[in-house]
Amino acid sequence: SHWLWPVQGTSYSQGFSEHEYVTKALIEHNKLESESAQSTLQYAEQLTVCLTKLLQTDGLAVQQVAVLMPGSSQQMAQELLEETKRQAAANEAVTQALGAVQIGKVAADALYWGAVENFAGLERPAVVLTGFHHPRHLMHKHKHQSQKQQSRVNSLAYLAATRSTYKV
């Protein structure tokens, strides 16, 4: 089974295609920092809810959970971690789990938080996918994507989803 907690997007991102959002809002109107900050708050809120459900309601151990995101932005991974820690401050189980995180480091006794690319070939019972529509990642995609045909399947999201043995 899986859950989807939608991050609704920012006021700028709604109503635009991904390409229009990046070119108009992030580049032309120079909104990368403000849009990133708003997206980070929204993602962290959902990550807090999700991690609470996995660790407390479902009773999973921290080493059974991986939080996977595109590896395009170390800054995004750090900002998401710090904001999720801040929002989860009242939740002891989540705070403890996040306190032991070292971004990108796979440890047998800790929650994994980092790039899906670094988690290839590994598995965890519960995998949380995040950051695939974060402005920092979208900007990276825009800069590094040629005019080639875009696949309908996000290969990183597919890789992340297939790392789960129980819940995505």
Image (tube, rainbow, N blue to C red):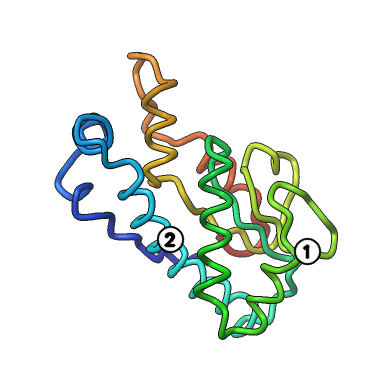
Mark before the other along the chain sequence, 2 or 1: 2
- Name the mark on residue 63: none
Q: Secondary structure at mark 2?
A: helix
Element on which disc 1 rests? loop
Residue 109 in percent (x, y) is at: 84, 65
Q: Position of residue 21 (x, y in %)?
A: 23, 38
Residue nearest the viewer, comparing 45 with 30: 30
- Badge 2 crowding class, 10 Å Cα cut-off, few under 14, some 14 to 19, many 20 or more, is many
The residue shown at (58%, 46%) is: 160
Instruction: Report whether 77 appears left or right of 61.
Output: left
Circle 2 is placed at which residue position? 43
Q: Is residue 26 above or below residue 85?
A: above
* Frontmost residue, 71 versus 148: 71
For disc 1, the marked residue is: 110
Amino acid type of disc 1? Ala
Q: Position of residue 163 (x, y in %)?
A: 65, 49
User: What is the C-alpha distance between the residues marked 2 and 1?
Assistant: 21 Å
Residue type highlighted by circle 2: Tyr
Residue 34 x/y as whole percent? 31, 50
